[in-house]
Amino acid sequence: MITHDEHEDLGEADPHLWLDPQRMQTVVERTAKVLEAQLPEHAGEIDANEQRLLKTLNALDTQIAQALAPYKGRNFLIFHPSFGYFADRYSLAQHAIEVSGREPTPREMATLVTRAKDENIGTIFVSGQFSQTAAKRIASSLDAEVAVLDPLAEDYLENLKRATEALKAGFERTDSQ
């Protein structure tokens, strides 16, 4: 399994920074500055919207941090390595099935199954944009569930809440076995 940091070390930059609500606050601030410069007649409205969104993101960050605090240091297995920033933010460890954009070889699959058993992983996460074949094979080898974490869902705030609940459910499933 390859962690988020190992992907970064391999030169495979993770573009999914929006999945960390704290990083999104920086994006919002920078975007607002550009918009205010381009549309000075709307600066007051832009600033008000910026402040409202920053407050919402900060509250969501706090909510997620509290919800995932009991699972600090836990590992989760995901097909496509899209939740690395999210995992880093909340002290979790994302391990990817996919390596450099391809499904694992049979040997890599066997290694993944062994590590997942050793780490007591009971849920394999996938996103709807990718094949679920490898994830389902690993899940059946582990008697694990397959659940969706979608990095591209339309409703950003609701998506991060759903991701939090899905991860919690995955950890709780493992804890109850």
Image: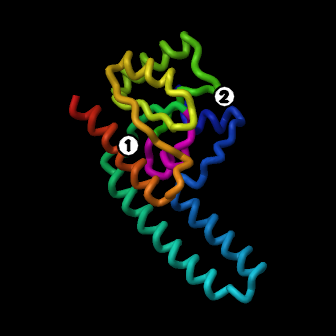
**Residue 100 numbered tag:** 2
Kind of element beneath mark 2: loop
Seen from this angle, which residue lies furthest right? Answer: 38
Above or below residue 148? Residue 164 is below
Q: Amino acid at mark 1?
A: Leu
Q: Amino acid at mark 2?
A: Ser
Label 1: how many residues lie within 10 Å, few (<14), some (14-19) or many (20+)? Answer: many
Counting every numbered tag in the picture gives: 2
**Residue 122 numbered tag:** none
Dot 2 or dot 1, earlier in sequence = 2
> Is-magenta flag for residue 128?
no
Start and end of the magenta stretch? 80-92
Question: Measured from the top left, where is residue 94 in percent x and y?
Answer: 49, 37
Question: Measured from the top left, where is residue 142 in percent x and y?
Answer: 35, 19
Question: Measured from the top left, where is residue 137 in percent x and y?
Answer: 44, 18
Residue that label 1 marks: 167
Q: Quadrant of the C terminus?
A: top left
Above or below residue 149? Residue 105 is above
In front: 82, or 127?
127
